[in-house]
Image (spheres, rainbow, N blue to C red):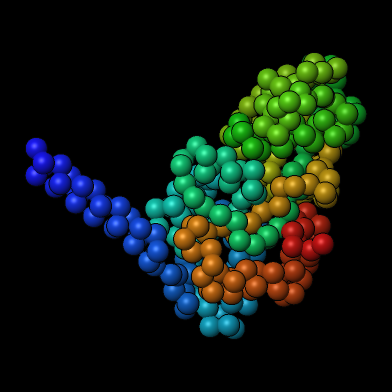
Amino acid sequence: MKKLALLFVILLSGILAACGNNAENAEALSEDKLVVGVTAGPQEQILEAAAEVAVEDGLEIEIKVFSDYVLPNTTLAEGDLDANSYQHKPFLDEFNEDHDTDLVPVGETILNPMGVYSETYDNIDDLPQGATFGLPNDPSNGSRSLFILEEAGLITLDEENKETASIHDVVDNPLELEFVELDAAQIPNQLSEVDAAAINTNFALGAGISPKDDAILLESTNSPYVNYIVVRAENQDDPVVETLVNAYQSDKVKAFIEEEFEGSIIPGWED
């Protein structure tokens, strides 16, 4: 028994030592090339502009495009991406908690002001009693759409659960809005089926909808939902990450955003 106990201690010590060495000796990202994930649309376009700046600093950026909000994070956590650029911090925090991952934000990118749209009504004040309202079915963007409605005075949310509000936390709903939770990417295609809906900017633009011109209600510019470049925690201090962030936050990329999107997307690193 003593020999078995001693063997167990030796094996356990070896495992712990190996884990410690892995943490301390995490492989740094390449200084010459990064593989970065984005969602299709504006995020992809803006990263392409950042890649043109990065190459001037000797950094090649290979862009991988995704069509949903989950795979860019799971692929990053699994090590098949070096970074991604598509999400705000509330979404990232929720993802880390749900998937037991350790992904960290390293630099602000853009604000995609979420808008409310309707094929029937031209003003948010025109919504009738009992109107159907579509909103994203993922927790963070669902909460975000409810915040917009509350800011406009259409609903009141439970103060205790405000940061993670769902449709079940609506405590006052004078219009008796009927909430319909939908996949965020599909809401533009289903807009005709509801009286109004909250749509993420990238999906709106992808469907030919202009947040600036077509929204009947637009998220205010003091929104906390700024997007970030995200990496694994073990790589957050790698010098190449700073190179990537600096390329993205350059004057050239800022000018591209302002010219290309005309206020529908806002550089998020500005004070």
The structure residue drawn at horizontal position 82% and vertical position 24%, both measured from the top left corner, is 156
Extreme residue toward the front, this view: 2
The structure residue drawn at horizontal position 68% and vertical position 60%, both measured from the top left corner, is 108
**Is residue 15 rendered to the left or right of residue 22?**
left
Above or below residue 63? Residue 224 is above
Q: Nearer the viewer, residue 162 or 153?
A: 162
**Is residue 126 rendered to the left or right of residue 159?**
right
**Is residue 224 rendered to the left or right of residue 245?**
right
Would residue 40 be seen by someone viewing this image from the given angle?
Answer: no
Above or below residue 117? Residue 175 is above
Whole-percent x, y for residue 233 in the image: 50, 57
Above or below residue 187? Residue 113 is below
Would residue 90 be seen by someone viewing this image from the given angle?
Answer: yes
The structure residue drawn at horizontal position 74% and vertical position 43%, both measured from the top left corner, is 114
Q: Nearer the viewer, residue 164 or 65?
A: 164
Whole-percent x, y for residue 98 in the image: 50, 37
| Quarter-of-image position of residue 249 | bottom right
> In which quadrant will I find the C terminus?
bottom right
Whole-percent x, y for residue 33 in the image: 46, 74
**Is residue 83 rendered to the left or right of residue 137?**
left
> In which quadrant will I find the N terminus?
top left
| Quarter-of-image position of residue 165 | top right
Q: How many marks?
A: 0
Whole-percent x, y for residue 210 in the image: 77, 49
